[in-house]
């Protein structure tokens, strides 16, 4: 039976599971899907700069192998033959690793990160490596290695970061799934700015290897066209690996009673419109409020306003981030500061100002904040907040107009809703919840108790269905 020829716009609108099912049923070829993905990726590149490299030759080879496997009835998983992209801080054996930096030109790892390894084993076809700021240290898409990554909704605006290219290429339609990392919002920030779902699982749920200088904050997670793309990726990658000891502690106490409430329409969902007393910009506030009205009207659950009984833990995050990056990259600063991001290099002297006493005080404050956040979920099943207090700002700027450009970590001054949940390690997803008057997406964040990844994703799927954002595309789809 001959393969069906998918149009580019059809390909760009289908979830990964559907594409894989069409491959399994021999309706479409992984080779065709890969060519469509590469066509869309290359068409958007002059505007977006989402890729460090497109792995065209290898991707076509992989696609041919996956096609033959499907013809032989050897389908690896529900992702078999589907094109994906990976952030350029994941190891992929035999291919250069840049991590947004000019400090290690030509470095080629001889091992593959667990998440990437599992996706390859599942039959996915990697078409390229996506951009990141230097060592993923900030929330924008600007790096010394690749320059500026731009937003598909408006290339004059920021893609967000640090999973900048991953979010941009999914939003542009090139791939149904891309993977990223999130130590302070680096999946959820660009997901919000680019109008797609992006998920930070429970700390360790998807193993992170090699470890990072901020290991107790660092998560690996997927971005996708739909929540189901996120769920599928987690199914295939979310289990322990001895290279990341935290991956053995990612399960929670169990969600049995919460699932019963979800099925019965009595799930307790807390709404926090102004997390930590910080109000979003008016455009985001209005978009979020409209989305909440839709959700409370059409999703079966019990909704109430709530709050986390703790102050914004900015000083805690700054302590861990500045000391981790400043000391961890200290030798590199000494050798290569002239070719590195000045904002990152600045963390070297800033880290020297911290005493051991201050560091241990931050550990104690983290424990207190985590206790308050966990206690909230004794009475609440899930929490809904805006993902970001703002929409995407100028692509070449590190802070929005009027922002704290001289702060130790300028990017956390405009991301107060994301990094607190890296401190706690809880699962959190950003969903697109609407478009503001200036034509830019705003995000809605759903946070759950430790280990409740599946519950968060199922509720997110219900919210996604109600908000029906899925038909919106930021760029004209290439049709030739």
Image (tube, rainbow, N blue to C red):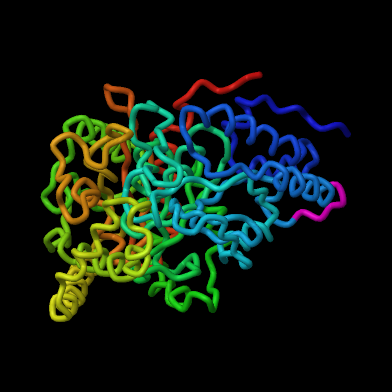
x, y percent for residue 358 = 14, 75
Q: Is residue 273 highlighted in magenta?
A: no
Residue 116 horizontal/vertical position (percent): 59, 59
Regarding residue 435, the answer to whether it shows in the image is yes
> Which region is colored magenta?
71-75
Magenta stretch secondary structure, dominant: loop
Q: Is residue 315 above or below residue 272?
A: below
Residue 449, percent from left and from top: 33, 64
Above or below, 89 against 169 in this view is below
Q: Residue, x 49% and y 65% (percent of image)?
A: 206
- Kindly indicate the quadrant of the structure image that contains residue 288: top left
**Quarter of the image with the C terminus in it:** top right
Exactly how many numbered labels are in the figure? Answer: 0
For residue 449, say whether it is visible: no
Q: Position of residue 233 (x, y in %)?
A: 55, 54
Q: Is 98 or 228 nearer to us in this picture?
A: 98
Residue, x 38% and y 43% (percent of image)?
141
Taking 77 as reference, is 473 above or below it? above
Query: From the viewer's perspective, is residue 405 above or below residue 433?
Result: below
């Amino acid at each position: 039976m001959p393969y069906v020829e998918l149009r580019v716009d059809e390909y760009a609108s289908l979830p990964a599971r559907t594409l894989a099912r069409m491959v399994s049923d021999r309706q479409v070829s992984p080779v065709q899907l890969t060519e469509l993905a590469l066509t869309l990726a290359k068409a958007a590149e002059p505007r977006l700069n989402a890729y460090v490299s497109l792995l065209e030759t290898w991707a076509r080879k992989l696609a041919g192998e996956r096609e033959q496997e499907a013809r032989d009835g050897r389908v690896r998983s529900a992702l078999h033959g589907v094109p994906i992209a990976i952030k350029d801080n994941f190891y992929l054996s035999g291919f250069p690793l840049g991590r947004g930096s000019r400090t290690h030109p030509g470095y080629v790892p001889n091992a593959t990160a667990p998440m990437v390894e599992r996706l390859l084993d599942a039959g996915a076809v990697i078409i390229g490596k996506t951009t990141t700021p230097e060592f993923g240290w900030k929330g924008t898409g600007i790096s010394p290695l690749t320059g500026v990554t731009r937003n598909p909704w408006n290339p004059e605006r920021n893609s967000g970061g640090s999973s900048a290219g991953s979010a941009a290429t999914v939003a542009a339609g090139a791939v149904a799934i891309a993977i990223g990392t999130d130590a302070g919002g680096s999946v959820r920030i660009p997901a919000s700015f680019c109008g797609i779902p992006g998920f930070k699982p429970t700390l360790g749920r998807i193993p992170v290897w090699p470890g990072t200088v901020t290991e107790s904050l660092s998560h690996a997670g997927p971005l996708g066209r739909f929540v189901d793309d996120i769920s599928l990726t987690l199914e295939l990658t979310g289990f322990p690996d001895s290279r990341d000891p935290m991956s053995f502690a990612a399960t929670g106490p169990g969600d049995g009673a919460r699932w019963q409430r979800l099925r019965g329409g009595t799930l307790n969902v807390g709404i926090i419109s102004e997390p930590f007393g910080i109000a979003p910009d008016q455009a985001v506030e209005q978009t979020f409020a409209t989305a909440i009205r839709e959700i409370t009207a059409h999703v079966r659950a019990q909704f109430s306003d709530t709050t986390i009984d703790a102050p914004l833990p900015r000083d805690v995050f700054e302590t861990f981030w500045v000391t981790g990056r400043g000391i961890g990259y200290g030798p590199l600063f000494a050798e290569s500061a002239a070719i590195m991001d000045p904002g990152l290099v600045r963390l070297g002297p800033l880290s020297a100002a911290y005493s051991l006493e201050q560091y241990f005080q931050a550990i104690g404050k983290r424990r207190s904040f985590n206790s308050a956040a966990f206690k909230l979920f004794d009475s609440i099943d899930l929490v809904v907040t805006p993902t970001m207090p703002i929409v995407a700002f100028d692509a070449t700027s590190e802070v929005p107009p009027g922002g704290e450009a001289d702060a130790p970590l300028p990017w956390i001054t405009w991301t107060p809703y994301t990094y607190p949940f890296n401190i706690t390690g809880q699962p959190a997803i950003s969903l697109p919840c609407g478009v503001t008057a200036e034509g830019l997406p705003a995000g809605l964040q759903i946070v759950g108790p430790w280990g409740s990844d599946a519950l968060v994703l199922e509720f997110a799927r219900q919210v996604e269905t109600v908000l029906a954002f899925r038909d919106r595309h930021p760029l004209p789809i290439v049709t030739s």
